[in-house]
Image (cartoon, rainbow, N blue to C red):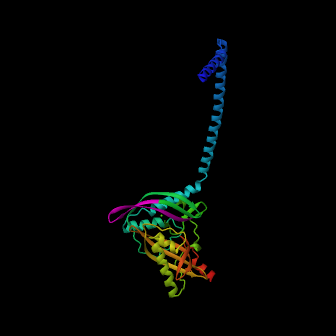
Amino acid sequence: MIRGFKKREKNQERLKKLSDKKVYTPKKINQKGANLVFGSLLIGFVVFVGATGVLSIKNISKVKEFEKNQIAKVDNSEIDRRLEQFLDSYVSYYFTYKAGEKDSEENAKRLNEFYGTPPSVKNQGQSKQDMTIVSGRLLMAKDGVAVYAVTYDTKVDNKVQRVSIEFSIPYVEKDGRYYVDGLPWFAPVTDFKSQEIDKEKQLILTANDGLSENDRKDLVAFIELFFKNYTSSQSNLDLISKNIKTIGGATVKSIDYTYFVKGGDKTLAYVQVTFDILGTSHSENFSFELRKDKDSYFVDKMEHQIPFDYAKKDKKEN
C-alpha cells in the first residue's frame, strides 16, 4: 500500500511539471515574408543549375578533346593499315583454293608475288583440298611477325569441315613497302610489295652438315619424337621441351630437311617439316637449341624460322 501511494504521488508531480511547460506554437508568416523565402530559394536553385551547367560544359569539352586525341592517334597508324591491307590479301589467297591443275598453278603464282623470293620447299608432293576463307583478323604485328586469327572451310570426303587456327607470317618492311619473308606457320595488296630484295639473305636449304651416320640417326630420331608429341600430347612434349605448346588437329606428313650443328654443351637443329590438316598440307621452318639429356635430348628453345646464314653459323662456331 505504501509503495502504491508513493508511486501515485510521484506520477502526480510529473504531470504537474509537464503542465507547467510552455507549448510551442509556430509563428504566422505574413505574405511579405513568404515572398522573401520563396525568392531566396529560387535564386539558390538558379545558381546551382548554372554551376552544374558550367561543369557539364567543361566535362564535354574534355571528352571532345580526348576523342580528338584518339582520332589523331588512329590517323597516325597509316603504315600499320597498309601492312594489314597487304597481309589481308596474302591470307585471303593462302586460304582460298580450288583443286585442279590450272587453279593450282594460278594460286601458287599469286602467292609467290607476296614473297621477297619464293621460299625453298623441299617437299614437292604437297596436297591441297578445296579451301574457302571464312574470316581472317590481324591480332598483332611485332618484330617482323604478324599473327592472324583465321577460320576457313575445307572439304574432306565431300564433307565441309571448319578449321580455326592462329597463322603467323614473317614479313619485312622497306621504305613503306612490304614482302613476306619465308614460310608462314600455324599455331593453338600486291602494290605494297617491295621491289628491292636482298638476294644475299635468301634462305636456300641445300647445305650438308657433315655429321656421322650415328650422330645423325640419333638426332633425327629425337626430332621425329618431338614432332610426334608436338601434334598429339602436351604431357609427353613437356618431358622433352621447355615452354612449348602442342598444335591440335595437325599431323606430321614428312620431315623434309634437317641440318645439325654440334657444339660443346648444345646442338643447333634446323628443320623443315610438312604438316597435314584435314587433307591440306603445308611446310614450316624450325630452329632448335638442344642439350644432351641422358641418352636423348631436350629442347631448350624453339623458333619458327631458319636464319638465311644457318650454314655459315656452323663454320663460325667451329
The N terminus appears in which quarter of the rendering? top right
Q: Position of residue 66 (x, y in %)?
A: 62, 44
Q: Quadrant of residue 302?
A: bottom right
Report if residue 309 lies within the magenta region: no
The answer to which quarter of the image holds residue 210 is bottom right
Camera-nearest residue between 262 and 107: 262
Q: Residue, x 49% and y 72% (percent of image)?
A: 237
Considering depth in this image, is 226 or 158 the residue closer to the camera?
226
Q: Position of residue 218 (x, y in %)?
A: 50, 83
Magenta span dominant secondary structure: strand
Note whether 212 is above or below 169 in the view shown.
below
Q: Residue at x 52, y 61 (%)?
A: 147
Q: Is residue 92 left or right of residue 242?
A: left
Q: Is residue 301 above or below residue 34?
A: below
Depth check: give the residue in front, 278 or 68. 278
Q: Is residue 51 visible?
A: yes
Report x, y in % for residue 247.
46, 67
Q: Position of residue 171 (x, y in %)?
A: 55, 65
Residue 183 placement, left or right of 43: left
Q: Is residue 306 above or below residue 20?
A: below
Residue reaching furthest left? 158
Residue ranking furthest to the front:
1
> How many callouts does the rendering have?
0
Span shown in magenta: 150-171
Q: Quadrant of the C terminus?
A: bottom right
> Is any atom of residue 283 visible in this view?
no
> Could you say which is closer to the camera, residue 269 or residue 107?
269
- In the rendered image, residue 159 lying in the magenta stretch gets the answer yes
